[in-house]
Image (cartoon, rainbow, N blue to C red):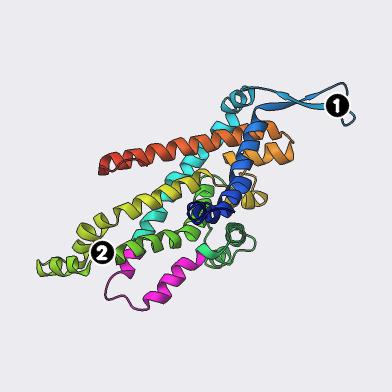
Amino acid sequence: MASPRTARRLAPYGFLAPAIILFGLLFALPIGYAIHLSLHTVRVKGLGLGAKAREEVWAGLSNYSSALADPELLAGAGRVLRYGAMLVPSMLGLALLFALLLDTARTRFRAASRLAIFLPYAVPGIIGSLLWGFLYLPSISPGYFLLRAAGLNGPDLLHGGGLYLALANIAVWGGTGFNMVVIFTSLRAIPAELYEAARLDGCSEAQIALRIKVPMVLPALVLTFFFSTIATLQVFAEPMTLSPLTNSLSSTWSPLMKVYRDAFVLGGLNSAAATAVVIALTTLVLSFGFLKLVNKRTGEPTS
């Protein structure tokens, strides 16, 4: 039986054990298995018939070299970057605007407004994509019906350049509320004395917002930009859900869609695992580089 001193020293590890076990089973183990798959390939013997006809053999880095040289992956990355260039500034700009408006003293129904803006975030991405997909279809959309009744032709949002607007609109609708809450919470933590001193100096509400509030919530803006960029690089639900509605969305439109096709449609688990690892490493490098750049400008060490 352990002594009381030993028990006190081991107690923290006992409390951490469930989290460590869940982390290992649900996070570390799948990552390790994906890396294992990416370093192997399947060799087919003879006609490929029978249980022993397919053998997993060591492939080294050949799956990674194939993934990096795949033009579909590079094209998908380019489309995602274009999508992100439209999405992230629009979403964060609206989130900042809504947070500043809700933080003004003259705003009425603040709680109801905050809930209404945040509510789309509670809708699952697939459900939101389906809802907007029906609104984008000219044959059933009430918006297109009203435009036709007025003698106007609505824009084609499921083909060409309008497709990026359609996808970005779904993400803006679903993600603005969460980012707004983060920024609004940061605004509420600013001491009211700063605003009072600024008003005594003759500053208007617009000047207070631009010269005090925005600089003070810059860490929150950096945080929301960081998470929004990661979510953009991992876009999957929106294009995957809209793909049956248009021929402009291929099965490899985004990198994660390519991983899904290779793994579950073509059966290439090993090549799909290598592509997934490449995407994860790229996201990690970009995220760490962004944080290092921000911390260098603010003078804070990178953790």
User: Is 156 in front, or is 263?
Assistant: 263
Which residue in the rendered view is the most extreme toward the bottom? 109
In this rendering, would 180 be left or right of 247? left
User: Is 175 in front, or is 219?
Assistant: 219
Q: Is residue 105 magenta?
A: yes
User: Is 73 in front, or is 164?
Assistant: 73
- Residue at image point 49% right, 54% down: 12
- Residue at image point 20% right, 57% down: 211
Answer above or below: position of 148 versus 169: below
- Three-letter amino acid code of the residue under disc 1: Ala
Answer above or below: position of 187 versus 92: below
* Residue 60 in view (yes/no): yes
Q: Residues within 10 Å of mark 2 (few under 14, many from 20)?
A: some
**Mark 2–mark 1 CB contact (< 8 Å):** no
Answer above or below: position of 128 versus 26: below
Residue 190 circle label: 2
Name the chief secondary structure element in magenta: helix
The magenta span reads 99-120
Q: Indicate the position of residue 65 as horizontal and vertical percent values.
A: 59, 23
Q: Is residue 14 magenta?
A: no
In space, the residues marked 2 and 1 are separated at their CA atoms by: 67 Å
